Amino acid sequence: MTSGLDRRRLLRTGAAMGVAGVAAGGLGGAALTAADLSPREATAAARPGLIPRIPVRTGLDKQAAANWSLFRGRRIGVLSNHTGVDREYRHLVDRMHADGVTIGGVFGPEHGFRGSAQAGGSEGTGIDARTGLTVYDAYTATQTKWQQMLTAAAVDTVVFDIQDVGCRFYTYIYALYDSMVVAARMGLRYVVLDRPNPIGGRAYGPMMTAGYTSGVGRKEIVQQHGMTVGELAKFYNGEFLPAEAGRSVDLEVVTCSGWFGRLRAGDTDLPWVLPSPNMPTPDTAVVYPGTGMFEGVASLSEGRGTTRPFELIGGPAWDYHWCDAVNAQNLPGVEFREAYFTPTFNKFANQLCAGVEVKVTDQNAFDPIRTGVAMLVEARKFAAFQWRVDGGARPYWIDLLTGSTRMRTMIDAGAGTDEVVGAWKDELAAFDARRRRYLLYSRLGS
């Protein structure tokens, strides 16, 4: 009998070969039989042309099945948004409220609890129409405001359930951090209902430095942190909370079952709910840690206002030459299509833009941050290129996204992709070693 991990690897390959081919030893002599598969997996693998998806249960799924045992007799505050749903798209708050769990308040991050607000917006504080519960606006909330909200809600337990996308400049993980710090100071219990990292368990990219922390990078983690929110909560609790809160928080993580670091969102059977308005598909999440850096470029749209945000990159002053230049780099797992688009909002709204569409051809070979660096290196060679400058003591937005001035100054000085990427090798290795004690899931093959 193969192990669970080997079984999944064989199953994924078996979609192309057929179960019989795998069972006959088509993968280096490893035999897979019907006894190795659950009925659901065997049915999926036997259907021609289908790539079977790995069954995964989230922390929400497991607590719902346990009749909310962790929360009975408690008064809880829920930090969640529209992604906090089960596989039938029923929301955590709606289910718990209907099941009689005492909820003192709900806290909505960027985009709001029900997900109605655009980037940089929230829904405000008010009464939720479906449940009648008070929803507090937690977007950009300071720790002082968090203490006021948690006190007003009179809770003894904070519950977090939000789908992250695995990138340092995605803001939900800082709502997690600040609420954990305040919960520790107030002596509250903290429970994370975990969800998979949709872009896998590999850490990569440059480290945030203390002088460049902001709302898009509050703590010293690398750009693609490679952790689930549960693992990140454990990392925060061990590495940062003792210094900032004076103690760790009473933390419990309800882990996922079936997930491991090699899996991405498209590999599992979990439903995808767009985590924010400009993150519509799992494909968007895969490219985001790299092409999200184009928020720091004034002369290029990152595709907001199109149907393919972060996959379409371009501007009014550009043409096909940039696409040719990035294709010439022969980056692994990706090709670039010459693309033309007209954003409906954000940068260059209602203006025709020329540029590229990022087409990922092999997610296992694709490196989003290296790809983003290569695109920036080539774009910087064109006269149309301009960094976004917002003024103040740290005027360049790209520095806040990448964690320091280093990437920008190296690219400005003419450094190539390998040189830029090589600059963070040591700090990445140190971070990767540091995070390992907090990991909850296998990273074999990640």
Image: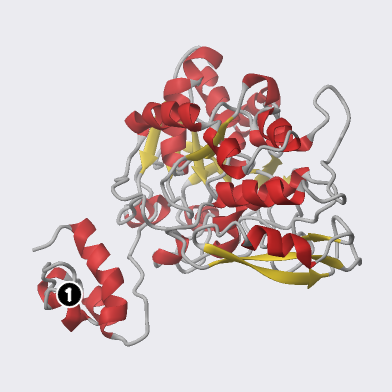
Q: Residues within 10 Å of mark 1 (few under 14, many from 20)?
A: some
238 relative to 360 in the view: left or right: left
166 relative to 384 in the view: left or right: left
Judged from the image, the secondary structure of the residue bearing numbered disc 1 is loop
Instruction: Inspect this view and state whether residue 222 appears.
Output: no
| Residue indicated by mark 1 | 26
Q: Quadrant of the N terminus?
A: bottom left
What x and y, as percent, mark residue 296? 76, 43
| Residue at the image point whose x is 59% and y is 66% from the top | 335
Number of on-image labels: 1
Q: In the rendered view, would you say 182 is above or below 134? A: above
Please name whichever residue, 35 or 428, is drawn nearer the observer in this view of the structure. Answer: 428
| Coloring scheme used | secondary structure
Residue type pointed to by label 1: Gly
| Residue at the image point whose x is 54% and y is 18% from the top | 185
What x and y, as percent, mark residue 443? 32, 45
Please name whichever residue, 172 or 29, is drawn nearer the observer in this view of the structure. Answer: 29
Quarter where residue 56 is shown = bottom left
